[in-house]
Image: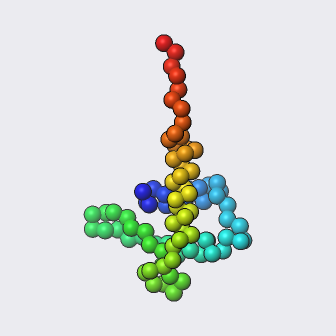
Amino acid sequence: MKPHSVTLLQEYTNSHKIVYTHTDIELVTELERMTYTKTPIGEVIYKTLTPKGGKRGEDHNTAAMLCAMVAYYMLVVGMLFSKAQKTIS
């Protein structure tokens, strides 16, 4: 689920559906520190580096943003819980 949420966040950022303000400095710098690796079987693993480049970064802002992206996508875009359309026979 995390790779999908990162892809959504990238798409929404690039298309300006999400706009960051000058007060979002902490969030933006945390997003900039996000990196990924691939396992031998091709699975993508995302990590947020520490400000000094360590592998155990604090990613609570990123995690919250990714959860919000998935929730928005599931509820609004994917219309996961929408009412079924009635068909006329």
- Residue drawn 51% across and 87% down? 52
Depth check, front residue: 88 or 28: 88
* Residue 27 in view: yes
Q: Is residue 47 above or below residue 2?
A: below
Q: Count up the numbered dots.
A: 0
19 w.r.t. 73: above or below: below
Q: Residue furthest right?
A: 22
Q: Residue at x 49, y 61 (%)?
A: 6
Relative horizontal placement of residue 68, taking residue 35 as reference (left or right):
right
Q: The N terminus is located in which quarter?
A: bottom left
Residue 8 visible in the shown view: no
Quadrant of the image occupied by residue 46: bottom left
Residue drawn at x 66%, y 74% is: 25
The colour scheme applied to this rendered structure is rainbow
Side of 39 where 76 appears, left or right: right
Front residue of 26 and 84 = 84
In the rendered view, would you say 32 is above or below 50? above
What percent of the width, then of the height, locates residue 47?
44, 72
Q: Position of residue 33 (x, y in %)?
A: 52, 75
